[in-house]
Amino acid sequence: MRVLVIGGNGQTGRLVIDEALQRGHKVTAWIRDPSALPAKEGLTIVKGTPLEPSNIESAFNAVQSDIPTAVIVTLGSPQVKGTRVMTNAHENLLAAMKRHGVSKIATLSSFGVGSSFPNINAIMRFAISRTSFKHLFEDHNQVDMTLKKSGVKFVLFRAARLTLGEKRPFSSWATTGKDSVFSRAWGGSRGPVWRRVWWMLLRRALGIAAPL
């Protein structure tokens, strides 16, 4: 299986790539600066940005005989008014996916997006509503709606605050986060995220039973 990872040079993106390669899968990583990501067996690195539709074909066709089966997005969005980084990237990706017959996508979102908003704590509700955080959450909310209307198979992973702690067991509350720990306190390690995203993608997109 080959996956296309968008945002592969970020902290979470690198973990996703490493886990995929360790499990014997092939990865195409689409990043702005290829020199920032070390070469590895099974990894194809492509320069570009999902904000430029003209770049997209190079990512899907990087290995002519092996089109990606699925897309994993680990991009972030700036805290700038009117930002559409995530939304525009997904609109461009979805158009390319349909051209190439790719129907599976997993996106790293955030707890507080969409229907999970009522279940975050008061501090985060204030931050999302009254600070510059609201701009990136508006972008994520638009992605949420875009994917739901797209007709493709998708996973939206609404992660809480991510740190660089060690890998450890995690809990999930599908799909709104009600009664989760982060609804009362702060979140935890970035370590398990790559594993959660990866196996959620496999279970949803490929229809297999895979241990978390």
Image: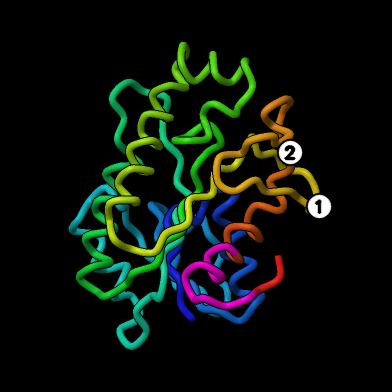
Q: Quadrant of residue 30?
A: bottom left
- Verify whether residue 201 appears in magenta: yes
Position of residue 17 measured from the top left corner of the image (x, y, whole percent): 57, 64
Circle 1 packing at 10 Å, graded few (<14), some (14-19), many (20+), is: few
Magenta residues: mostly which secondary structure? helix
Dot 2: element: loop
Position of residue 193 measured from the top left corner of the image (x, y, whole percent): 65, 52
Dot 1: element: loop
Q: Name the residue under label 2.
A: 188
- The residue under the point 70% across, 36% down is 180
Q: Please state the extent of the stretch shown in magenta in the rendering.
A: 200-209
Q: Which of marks 1 and 2 is nearer the N terminus?
A: 1
Position of residue 59 measured from the top left corner of the image (x, y, whole percent): 32, 67
Distance from disc 1 to disc 2, alpha carbons, whole Å, reads: 10 Å
Residue 168's label in the rendered image is 1
Residue 123's label in the rendered image is none
In this rendering, is residue 79 above or below 26? above
Q: In this view, does 62 lie to the left or right of 16?
A: left
Going by the numbered disc 2, the residue's amino acid type is Gly
Q: What is the quadrant of the C terminus in the image? A: bottom right
Going by the numbered disc 1, the residue's amino acid type is Arg
